[in-house]
Amino acid sequence: MKCSKVFSLSLLALFSSASFAEPAVMISDFRCTLFDGDGGFFSTNDTKVVNSNNGKGGQINFKCHASGVPNSTGTAVHYDFESTGQRCNTLFGSTTDWKEVVDSEGNAQLTCKIHVKGNS
């Protein structure tokens, strides 16, 4: 059964696009909204963005970590595009390449991968 709820990864940080000229850049402390274990939503600021730029294109990885996330199932819950039909929406684009795990202890991790085209 596909979940009809929509979520998005929201960046609440200001930074220069020139900061991505280096081979790898990390940004942290922005707001991220993810699924909880019960199919609801949970927000956190425990986040990181890593840009791996090799000059031929690269990948931007968005990672959110949260604790105290509701999960009444008693087991780990896994979400991704295939199970929800939802995309991970970020400031840098939208992707179907994402996964989230909420463990039975209420710890969650969301990872979204944005694939970047090479420079001309």
Image (tube, rainbow, N blue to C red):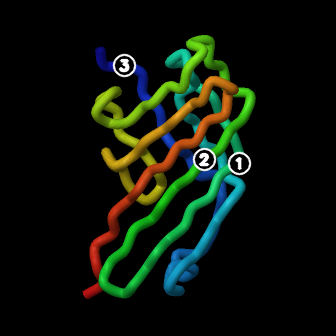
> Label 3 crowding class (10 Å Cα cut-off): few <14, some 14-19, many 20+?
few
Q: Residue at x 56, y 46 (%)?
A: 10
Q: Secondary structure at mark 3?
A: loop
Q: Which residue is mark 1?
A: 46
Q: Is residue 52 above or below residue 80?
A: below
Mark 3 or 2 closer to N-term? 3
* Rendered image: mark on residue 29: none
Q: Which residue is mark 3?
A: 3
Q: CA distance from mark 1 to mark 3?
A: 25 Å
Q: Is residue 104 above or below residue 62?
A: above
Q: Amino acid at mark 2?
A: Cys
Q: Which residue is mark 2?
A: 64
Q: Position of residue 80 (x, y in %)?
A: 38, 36
> Label 2 crowding class (10 Å Cα cut-off): few <14, some 14-19, many 20+?
many
Pick whichever, 91 or 68, lies toward us. 68
Position of 39 with respect to 86 (left or right) is: right
